[in-house]
Image (tube, helix red, strand yellow):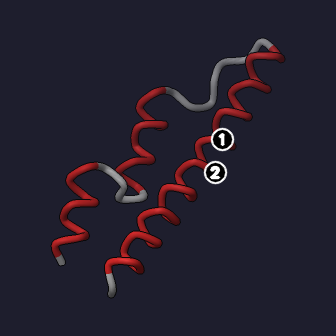
Amino acid sequence: MTPEQQAAYVFAQSANALIEAMGMLSENLQRMHRGESLAWDDDEFNNLITKYGIGHNDVLSFYQQ
């Protein structure tokens, strides 16, 4: 994989995480509006970084392959 392809992959993974986070945020806002408990907490938002492999060490390891 070329460096450009690697960068495109990391960018796409970041976009995927952002899209999922926005869906989670939207659900939480709807629940807040209805007076219900939140569906997602901080840990679950932070876990998206691991799920999509976009943490600092993950990205550095990916580029070293």
Vertical position of residue 21 compared to residue 6: above or below: above
Q: In which quarter of the image is the C terminus?
A: bottom left
User: Residue at point 49% right, 56% down?
Assistant: 14
Does dot 1 land on a helix, a strand or a loop?
A: helix
In the rendered image, the residue lying farthest to the front is 4
Vertical position of residue 50 compared to residue 41: above or below: below
Mark 1 in CB contact with mark 2 (< 8 angstroms): yes
Vertical position of residue 58 compared to residue 44: above or below: below
**Residue underneath mark 1:** 22
Where is residue 45? Give x, y as percent: 48, 37
Residue 14 relative to residue 28: left or right:
left
Residue 61 relative to residue 47: left or right:
left
Where is residue 16? Give x, y as percent: 56, 58
Q: How many marks?
A: 2
Where is residue 20? Give x, y as percent: 61, 49
Q: How crowded is mark 2: few (under 14 residues within 10 Å), some or many (20 or more)?
A: few
User: Residue at point 63% right, 23% down?
Assistant: 38
**Residue underneath mark 2:** 19
Where is residue 63? Give x, y as percent: 23, 70
**Callout 2 amino acid:** Ile
Residue 34 relative to residue 29: left or right:
right
Q: Where residue 11 is drawn, which disc sits there?
A: none
Q: In which quarter of the image is the N terminus?
A: bottom left
Q: Which of 37 and 55 is in front in this view?
A: 55
**Callout 1 amino acid:** Met
Does dot 2 land on a helix, a strand or a loop?
A: helix
Vertical position of residue 15 compared to residue 31: above or below: below
Using the numbered discs, state the Cα–Cα distance from disc 1 to disc 2 in whole angstroms.
5 Å
In the rendered image, the residue lying farthest to the right is 34
User: Residue at point 36% right, 55% down?
Assistant: 54
